[in-house]
Image (spheres, rainbow, N blue to C red):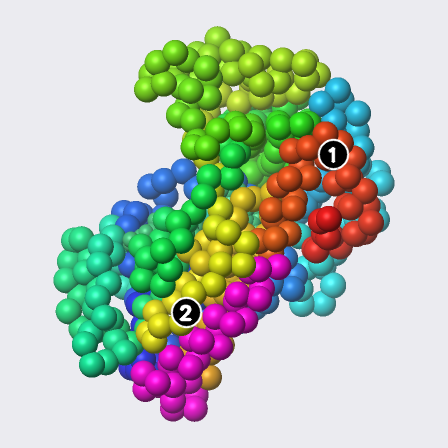
Amino acid sequence: MAVTEPRIAIIGAGPAGLMLASILHHNDIPCVVFERDSSAIVRAQGGTLDIHEYSGQQALDAAGLLDQFRALMRQGGDTIKILTKDGTVLFDNSGESREEFETEIKGKFVKGRPEIDRPVLKDLLIASLPPNTIYWGSKVISITPVSDSKKWMLEIDNDSHPAPYDLVIGADGAWSHTRTFLTEQQPMYSGITALDVWLHGVDEAAPDVSKFVGLGNCFLFDKDRVLLFQRNGQGREGSARCYVCVKTNTPTPPSSAALLGLEDEGAEVDWADARTREVFVQRYFGDWNAEFKRMVLAMTGQPVLRPLYMLPVGLEWESRPGVTLVGDAAHLMTPFAGVGVNVALMDALELARGIINCVETGKTDGDALAVMLQQYETGMFARSRKETAKTEAAMHLQFQEGGAEKLTNMVRAAGPEPEDLTYE
Ligand SMILES: Cc1cc2nc3c(=O)[nH]c(=O)nc-3n(C[C@H](O)[C@H](O)[C@H](O)COP(=O)(O)OP(=O)(O)OC[C@H]3O[C@@H](n4cnc5c(N)ncnc54)[C@H](O)[C@@H]3O)c2cc1C
């Protein structure tokens, strides 16, 4: 039978918040999730996510979702090609030589870094929750401590939720409102902006692009410029995506117009116009192999500008009873080590374990919950320090001269199950 205490509110229905809700539900512990988006599909979700054996997959297992994940992950999605800007192939495990690197399904967990499309992962998690768990279109606008207690009140922009919560968990991403109750630290611009461009129905629309991107990832590196091609979806519905990453060397991110070098920085950018795409590609990739430029030019879907922000390595705060953070809200990082979502899912797993233990031992008063949060945060700080440091090192390596060669050596050294690369 489901317990009624503690009352738990999760703010944000991203991977971290949904994963936490799903594990709790799997253990008969109810919670509510407030999400400002009106639905799961209202916003462009972005690309594919690699779910690691020793982190993300452990969380899915704790929610009873590992088998479903295995059925939904993309076979071959973890293949990697690494090229230099002149077309030299440094690494490719997508062809005959792939045998050695094949995604291995050994026992319960999938070896390596199997990929799943972000909307597919979110749908899986949403479907695992009972109806009325997620309040869509519900932006949390204030969180207030209840005096003489360790509880918190929430104010939602479209509704009232008058009863106080014993636990408020901020899974509200990069610009977390919940974080402001714990630390003044705001995300910093990494100096890199990605233009997220894509092409729907790539197999039919552009078979050459489809072949180039392959089943998984195709990465190209040069100083201050990186192209990260990836496949999303499958078959007729499949698309190819490229994060066109530019080191802007500016203290703040540029607008789309500024990125393209337009004089009017506020001007509307018409990406459907082939000339606009050509100006952009020529501006940043003028001396790159013509083939690669053609691949980016083929991505005609309306792009999303993604300035990349990060929180400092090793961010910590003094624990407060009744409120904590999971995922990007706690340790936002750039995507260059491909670990952000895995750390987020580990947070969800570790916090869920703490809550389950409190419930099972009947220790759900404010003091016991406060101790549990402190223990969760101690573990999370240690984990996120390691992963944010790795990510920062990966970012510097990939945007430097000779970065492609260095990354290739690391991938080779890591072998067939490259879950954990060591960046120097
Ligand atoms: C371009 C790019 C590529 C990436 N690729 C990878 C990868 O390959 N592998 C990997 O491991 N990681 C990757 N990441 C990182 C990964 O996407 C994040 O770490 C992950 O999405 C974090 O999940 P989250 O649930 O913490 O936050 P989010 O996904 O940001 O979810 C937060 C949710 O909270 C909601 N919200 C915010 N404020 C409020 C509010 N006040 N009230 C209610 N709801 C609110 C938001 O609408 C959102 O739905 C990538 C990131 C980017 C930008």
Specify the segment rendered in magenta: 358-386
Mark 2 belongs to which amino acid? Glu
Kindly state the secondary structure of the residue where label 2 is placed.
Answer: loop
Residue matched to label 1 = 404
Q: Is residue 115 visible?
A: no
The residue lying toward the viewer, choosing from 130 and 271, is 271
Where on the picture, by quarter, is residue 167? bottom left
Residue at 49 percent across and 55 percent down: it is 331
Residue underneath mark 2? 318
Q: Is residue 140 visible?
A: yes
Q: Amino acid at mark 1?
A: Ala
Mark 2–mark 1 distance (CA, rounded to whole Å): 40 Å
Give the position of the N terminus as an image quadrant.
bottom left
- Count of number-bearing discs: 2
Residue 269's spot in the image, x, y percent?
38, 17
Q: Secondary structure at mark 1?
A: helix
Measured along the vertical axis of the image, is residue 65 above or below residue 418? below
Residue 408 falls in which quadrant of the image? top right
The residue drawn where x is 61% and y is 48% is 391
**Residue 373 included in the magenta stretch of the image:** yes
